[in-house]
Amino acid sequence: MEKSTEKHIPKIVLGCYPTPLQELENASRYLGAGRKLYIKRDDLIGIGFGGNKVRKMEYLLAQAREEGCDCIVTGGGSRSNQPLAAAACAAKAGLQAHIVYTKDQDTVSRKLGRLLGAAEHVADGSDKPNLMRDIRKTAAELKWQGRSPYIIPPGAASPLAALGYADMVEELAAQAKSMGITLDHIICYGATGNTYAGIVLGTKRYCPGTKATAVAIGRRFSHPDTLCRQARAAAKLRGWDADLSEEDFHIHFSCGKGASYPTEGGREAMQAMASSEGIFLDPYFTGKAFRGLQELNRTGTFAKGETIVFIHTGGLAVLLNSL
């Protein structure tokens, strides 16, 4: 992809970069066959509870300020890390956060949101609330009050947000080069697929010899054609020539009943990471993703002597809520 047409996109730096890239020596021995496992610690990004939403917020909140907005409106399901991440980032960016919670949202997340100065709104009380509808309704009410809200959809999923994880791959590639590491495979979790779309775009641009796989933690996951369109749209925003195809997208399902349900395998993977490396994962996102990595290893996806990087996308808040 050529850089000659690259466009400037406003961005607010909110995190502490680069986030650590650590070798997991004990976990590497578990993989066997001379494979080496590294972990990219976006859980240690330095704001709120960290996680993948921070890199996305750097673009979204910059756009909010460019548009003259004075607050954001967002929301998430009962297991989502997004509302707290959005509230923490908005506080640092000088924007008030308005969070739409579902009726089953745990009290810990609500209390932490209040600590961050977020205003609380309750979604429709039906068994299947339409969060996006309630987010738009809240934004309309704020406009009527004379405010200027910026809407962030659940999951913060958009082509603009995906650029945050193309940036992560650029950062990762520079770290690997300085450490003398060749990146063979990147593993991340997949929920909406937005983080993964950004990672695939980043690998094509900054380390084209690297394969990226998403471990889908829910039964409904975006198809490769949808992810490819999203990554191409992100590339277009930056003026990049994206030579992406559906063959660049690789999906492994490790979800059990669905995104909101922990799995026995995911909990075993959490235990393995904590007891061997002292690093916490969560039962809904990163635990399932690491379980998927273990499954890929057992089925021969990783060649002998390969270097694999696991992206730790956060999840401390939902872990604490699940204990």
Image: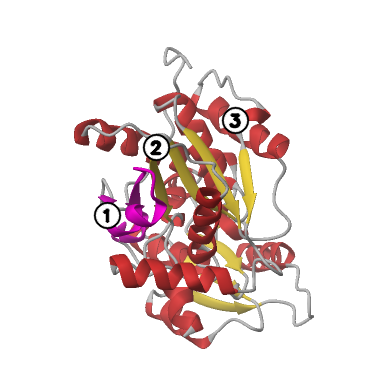
Residue drawn at point x = 43 percent, y = 80 percent: 320
Please tell me whether mark 2 sits on a helix, a strand or a loop: helix
Question: Looking at the picture, does residue 303 appear above or below residue 3?
Answer: below
Q: Which residues are magenta?
A: 21-46
Pointer 3: residues within 10 angstroms few (<14), some, or many (20+)?
some
Query: Which residue is at the front of the view, 155 or 300?
Result: 300
Residue 41 is a magenta residue: yes
Side of 63 where 172 appears, left or right: left
Instruction: Please state if 49 lies on the left or on the right of 81 as rendered.
Output: left
Residue drawn 45% across and 52% down?
57
Amino acid at dot 1: Glu
The residue nearer to you, when weighing 9 against 190, is 190
N-terminal label among 3 and 2 = 2
Pick whichever of labels 3 and 1 is earlier in the sequence. 1
- Residue 10 appears anywhere in the view: no
Mark positioned earlier in the residue sequence (2 or 1): 1
Q: Is residue 19 visible?
A: yes
The residue positioned 38% from the left and 74% from the top of the image is 116
Amino acid type at circle 3 is Asp
Q: Which residue bears the numbered disc 3?
A: 248
Q: Position of residue 203 (x, y in %)?
A: 46, 31
User: What secondary structure is marked by label 1?
Assistant: helix
Give the residue at mark 1: 25
The three-letter amino acid code for the residue at tag 2 is Val
